[in-house]
Amino acid sequence: MAIENTSERIARYTSQLSAELHDLRAQLYPPEARKQFGRTFTTQDLAKLLNIPKSTLRTLSLDGKGPVPERSKNGSRIYTLQQVRELREYLATQRPDDELTLLPHRRGTEKLQIMAAANFKGGSSKTTTSVHLAHYLALQGYRVLCIDLDPQASMTSTFGLQPEFDVGDDETAYAALRYDTNRRPFAEVIRETYFPGLHLVPANLELMDFEFDTPSALNKGVRDELGLFFARLRNAISTVEDSYDMVVIDTPPSLGYSTLAALYAATGMIVTVHPAMLDVASCNQFLLMISQLSDVLEEFGAKFQHSFFRVLLTRVNPNDGPQKFMSSVMRKLFAGDVMVAEALESTAVAAAGVAKKSLYELENGEVGREPLLRALDSVDRVNAEILGLIHDQWGRAS
């Protein structure tokens, strides 16, 4: 009897699992097997989101102005996410004094803000933080670009794409960063998503090639218009920056060349850390490595210059004594660089993750109402604090 070696067994397993995941996705998102934004918004939701009285929204609907909402079984007006964006544009023309609130795109000298979530320990909620931030910003009316730099492609999967089926060769950020003549313009690897106002550069295992190619390029002294490895992502983003207000980068759980490129490109850095002893110790090593590598990069003329650096405590259980102790240690040592808001541990977040959704996508009945409201309040606080930091850089009042 022939003995199957380990690599053959792994290849067989991955082939079988990929096919099964493909079939499951087809069941979840028929008939095109593509994810869609199913949640709708009531007038109460819009009143909170747009800071517009419900009476104004009812009057618009009765007068047939703006997007026409559907009616639920109980007669309530419900809007799609696309209609929410159309309503923002319509109201901005009717209420010039509120235009900046309704259409908060950056203006004048306001610079593109690039946020990178980073940590080389898995389970720190880096991808969860990135996706929720991106969805929150898009809901607020900003033009958002997500860049998935993690070869494991968790962010890409959350957007309903299966990396091995839906993302082909030269369709990731690597295609725009590579060192040879096959490099593509960055705009060509950006995809629209099911989420209006939010675009994505997807990921797959191809991104590992950047880690393999860079040492060779450095040894050969390769020079082109994108520059050395640390500057390539920033320079690629600059070719599309007029189309976006904010960029959210999900980095790999490692400190390789792509992570360094992301941190160099970023204007703001969010380090996600679970307040447990091993996680905090790992985070300390991560920060130590960044400090040491930044000294090395300075030899190439590169400096990490972020408008803000913040530590975000994630998966926090406020009733857990050891966690409370580690949180207090972090706040004592890092002071104002630890975010005030914390991302609480929640069954709602876990359920959303299983469904490959953010909390902002969950529809009625998918999780319990109370756990969902508590979890939403937590992520809203986190994201509002980050948005406040961005507004500070733009000189806007939050």
Image (tube, helix red, strand yellow):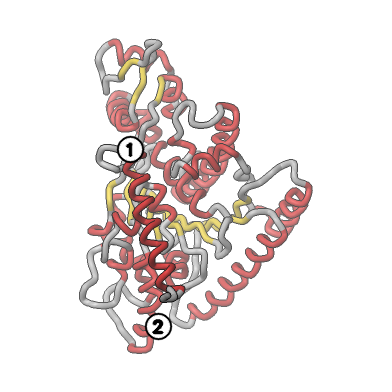
Viewer-nearest residue: 216 or 8: 8
- State left or right for residue 293 relative to residue 3: right
What residue is drawn where x is 42% and y is 16%? 54
Q: CA distance from mark 1 to mark 2?
A: 40 Å
Q: Residue at x 38, y 65 (%)?
A: 12
Q: Quick check: 243 left or right of 137?
A: left
Visible residue check, residue 377: yes
Height in image: 215 above or below 339?
Answer: below
Label 1 element class: loop
- Classed neighbour count for the residue bearing mark 2: other residues with Cα under 10 Å, few (<14), some (14–19), many (≥20): few
User: Residue 183 sits in which quadrant?
Assistant: bottom left
Task: Provide residue 334's location: percent of width, then percent of height.
Answer: 68, 58
Q: Is residue 341 in view?
A: no
First along the sequence among labels 1 and 2: 1
- The amino acid marked with disc number 2 is Pro
Front-most of residues 360 and 263: 360
Kind of residue at badge 1:
Gln
Does 338 sit left or right of 78 as displayed?
Answer: right
Marking on residue 215: 2
253 to 110, vertically: above or below:
below
Q: Residue furthest bottom?
A: 220
Give the image location of residue 271, x and y in percent: 57, 58
Give neighbour class at mark 1: few <14, some 14-19, many 20+ (Cα, 10 Å): some
- Residue labelled with disc 1: 36
Q: Which part of the image, by quadrant, shows the N terminus?
A: bottom left
Residue 202 in picture, x, y percent from top left: 34, 56
Q: Residue furthest left?
A: 181
Q: Quadrant location of residue 30?
A: top left
